[in-house]
Image (cartoon, rainbow, N blue to C red):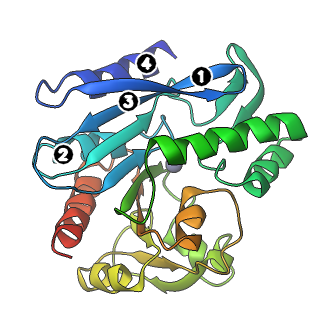
Amino acid sequence: MKIALTVFAVIFFTTPLLRAQTFAIPLGSRSVSFHRIDSQVSGDGPLLISLHSNEATSTRAARSLLVNYAGKLIAIDGGGQRRIPLKQGSNRVTIDPNRVFSLAGVKRDMDRFSIYSAAEAGQCAAFGEQIIKTCNISKERPVIALHNNTNGGYSIDSYLPGGSEAAAAAKVSRAPADPDNFFLVTHPKLFDDLVKAGFNVVLQDNSKAPDDGSLSVYCGRRGIVYVNVEAQHGADEEQKRMLEALLKLLGTR
Ligand SMILES: [Zn+2]
């Protein structure tokens, strides 16, 4: 835990140009810290959001690019852990912060661990609503979600017929690239542009994707332009290349 916190601090507090500000959002009886970094480049730019604090490769890539591109990065401070405890100091009930954007999603997540209670699920859904409000997630600007995965697990192939995520995909385009590194998008135009640029890309089926409480489904159902930039842990250069290609595409829209 100490190492994770140190890594997090190093990522967020070593670039003097871009200073992080911290704010908190209540979750049950505690509050969860988030760090916010604003690019100094003029223009609106997208919202870049990191909801899994163990996925540091993606936040490193985002932070380095905000020196040259407009936008804002908001990253949860989960102490280097993916799941967030509802009570400080107790791991009895935890939630995946990317499953809090609907009550149905929270319930699914809690049921997986047999920890569901209506009261605590309500607290998690309220946490999700507050993230949406505080981060101003709306059709006004694109949302870029930052994620990392492990080699050989969840990948673009999970969206192919027979895969665990197949029900969420309208189209899948496989490039001759590492399947762990891929985009998931909610808009057909971005799908086409990223395919043309040679990347692995999934177009989410916004009406049929099961409501898992994720930000991708939340945005897809509301017509919000959303892109998940997913890369393998440690694939810093590749994730930076993917993110930069995306920022350029969004910048010229
Ligand atoms: Zn993630």
Question: Which residue in the structure is indicated by mark 3?
Answer: 35
The answer to whether mark 1 and mark 3 are in CB contact below 8 A is no
Q: Distance from label 3 to label 2 (Cα)? A: 14 Å
Label 2 lies in ligand 1 vicinity (Cβ under 8 Å): no
Examine the rendered structure and indicate whether residue 187 appears above or below residue 102.
Answer: below
What residue appears at the point 25 percent right and 21 percent down from the top-left corner?
13
Q: Distance from label 1 to label 4 (Cα)? A: 17 Å
Q: Position of residue 26 (x, y in %)?
A: 61, 27
Mark 1: few/some/many CA within 10 Å (<14, 14-19, 20+) = some
What residue appears at the point 33 percent right and 34 percent down from the top-left corner?
36
Question: Which residue in the structure is indicated by mark 1?
Answer: 31
Question: Which residue in the structure is indicated by mark 4?
Answer: 5
Quadrant position of residue 117:
top right
First of labels 1, 4 by sequence position? 4
Q: Position of residue 185 (x, y in %)?
A: 44, 72
Compare residues 174 and 115 and report the one nearer the observer.
Answer: 115
Left/right placement of residue 8 relative to residue 168 reads left
Q: Distance from label 2 to label 4 (Cα)? A: 22 Å
